Image (cartoon, rainbow, N blue to C red):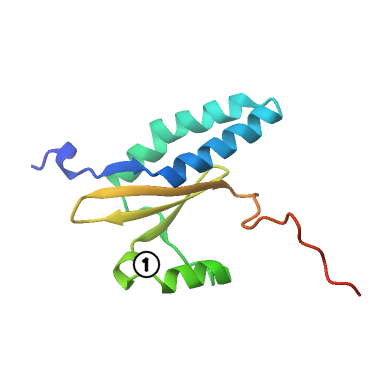
Amino acid sequence: MTDEAESRYRVILTAGFNARLDEIERFYASVGATSVVEALLIALHETVIPNLARFPRMGRRYGDRGAPSEGARAALEGLPALHAGALREYLHGDYLMLYAVTDPQRTVHLLSIRHHGQWSFDPAGWEPPAR
């Protein structure tokens, strides 16, 4: 019988993921809701990371739910097919996470996190067209 620890993948939080966590933390600190961040961090360490370590393909493949944005499509087209196919999405509670699985290294790279209600673009400076 295979040792369960041997079959697990290593989960790495990338700089981009950590930067998004910092943004989430700053937002909730600004509205006095630091307990939300504490709950998110607990969920990451107690649920999300262990789940991905054991079941790295539990999330759906990125882009399977429909056409991503123009920017996302352009970025995907710039990736080698092998890398683009490694991207997956994992929804946990109110948060959507983007991650990549690399089999030779048996590693899951958490790439980004956002609240499902967050804008996927920065609307600052955008003006609707004049009628």
The residue at 51%/38% (across/down) is 21
The quadrant of the image that shows the N terminus is top left
Of 110 and 58, which appears nearest the observer?
A: 110
Query: Hey, which quadrant is residue 3 in on the image?
Result: top left
110 lies above or below 129: above
- Horizontally, residue 98 falls left or right of residue 109, namely right
- Horizontally, residue 4 falls left or right of residue 49, namely left
The residue at 39%/31% (across/down) is 46
Taking the view exactly as shown, the residue that stands out farthest to the front is 125
Of 127 and 114, which appears nearest the observer?
A: 127
Taking the view exactly as shown, the residue that stands out farthest to the left is 1
The residue at 31%/55% (across/down) is 101
Could you say where residue 30 lies in the image, as x and y percent from the top left? 69, 30
Could you say where residue 69 lies in the image, as x and y percent from the top left? 57, 68
Query: Hey, which quadrant is residue 131 in on the image?
Result: bottom right
Could you say where residue 106 lies in the image, as x and y percent from the top left? 22, 50
Of 5 and 41, which appears nearest the observer?
A: 41
Badge 1 local density, few (<14 within 10 Å), some, or many (20+)? some
Q: Secondary structure at mark 1?
A: helix
Could you say where residue 118 lies in the image, as x and y percent from the top left? 64, 49
Residue tagged 1: 84
Taking the view exactly as shown, the residue that stands out farthest to the right is 131
The kind of residue on which mark 1 rests is Ala
77 lies above or below 10: below
**Tag count in the figure?**
1
Query: Hey, which quadrant is residue 59 in on the image?
Result: bottom left
The residue at 31%/50% (across/down) is 56
